[in-house]
Image (cartoon, grey):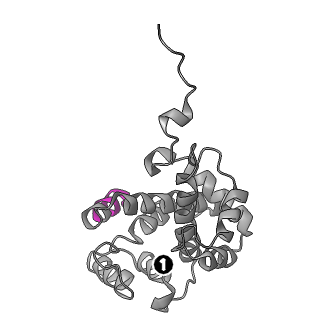
Amino acid sequence: MDRGAAWALLTEWTLNENLRKHALAVEACMTAYARKFGENEARWSVTALLHDFDYERYPDAPDHPLKGSEVLKEQGWPEDVRIAILGHADYTGVPRETLMAKALFACDELAGFITACSLVRPDRIRTLEGKSVRKRMKDKAFARSVSREDITRGAEELGIPLDEHIAFCIDAMRARAGELGLEPAPAASAEAAPPTA
């Protein structure tokens, strides 16, 4: 599994920086879970990076992820990667049978929601806690496009309590905060400088 090839395909098809950061956030969560479960980190990494690579060109269901899956098939990406990607969208009807497919579904919406929660905080993800994420989940107006049902169902399918899943993904994303754009703004991370004479 070649992460470089996956990143090249993602960046060729996806110009929007926020969509690229979303792929990296899902990758952070997925590779952390691969380590936790003793799975192939490289395989889980490319699956995360490629799960939405076609979204900018084909944002409407069912084109995304079906058209992207055909591109991946033509390029010789493994079937289990393609099936996991197809399974992250319920409307494809592709069941999530592997642990990798379940993890992708569980991490996708949650990574987006954690990003949204972080961006409204002065210190971004640095001190974000699971209880803050859970509180925001109750606010239907906040990040309204994120499916709370999918977040909850994803944790259930993965077999991990929701609070534990949220905390795990926060930690995974915090470790890569810089590349995800979730580091605190300079003014929020430094003490106010004393006035100069």
Give the answer, above or below, for where 15 lies relative to 91. Answer: above
Q: Which residue is mark 1?
A: 84
Give the answer, above or below, for where 197 lies relative to 103. Answer: above
In the depicted view, which residue is nearer to us: 29 or 179? 179
Is residue 5 in the magenta section?
yes
Percent of width and height locating residue 67:
31, 83
Element marked by disc 1:
helix
The type of residue carrying mark 1 is Ala
> Residue at position x 57%, y 60% from top?
114
- Number of residue marks: 1
In the depicted view, which residue is nearer to us: 78 or 124? 124
Percent of width and height locating residue 63:
34, 86
Percent of width and height locating residue 55:
35, 74
> Residue at position x 35%, y 79% from top?
59
- Mark 1: give few (<14), some (14-19) or many (20+) Cα within 10 Å: many
> Residue at position x 39%, y 72% from top?
52
Residue 58 image-quadrant placement: bottom left
Percent of width and height locating residue 141:
58, 71
In the depicted view, which residue is nearer to us: 40 or 66? 66
Would you say 152 lies left or right of 95 here?
A: right
**Quadrant in the picture for the N terminus:** bottom left
Give the answer, above or below, for where 28 lies relative to 93. Answer: above
Would you say 56 lies left or right of 107 here?
A: left
Q: Main secondary structure of the magenta part?
A: helix
Q: What are the residue bounds of the magenta stretch?
A: 1-9
Residue 111 image-quadrant placement: bottom right
> Residue at position x 41%, y 80% from top?
79
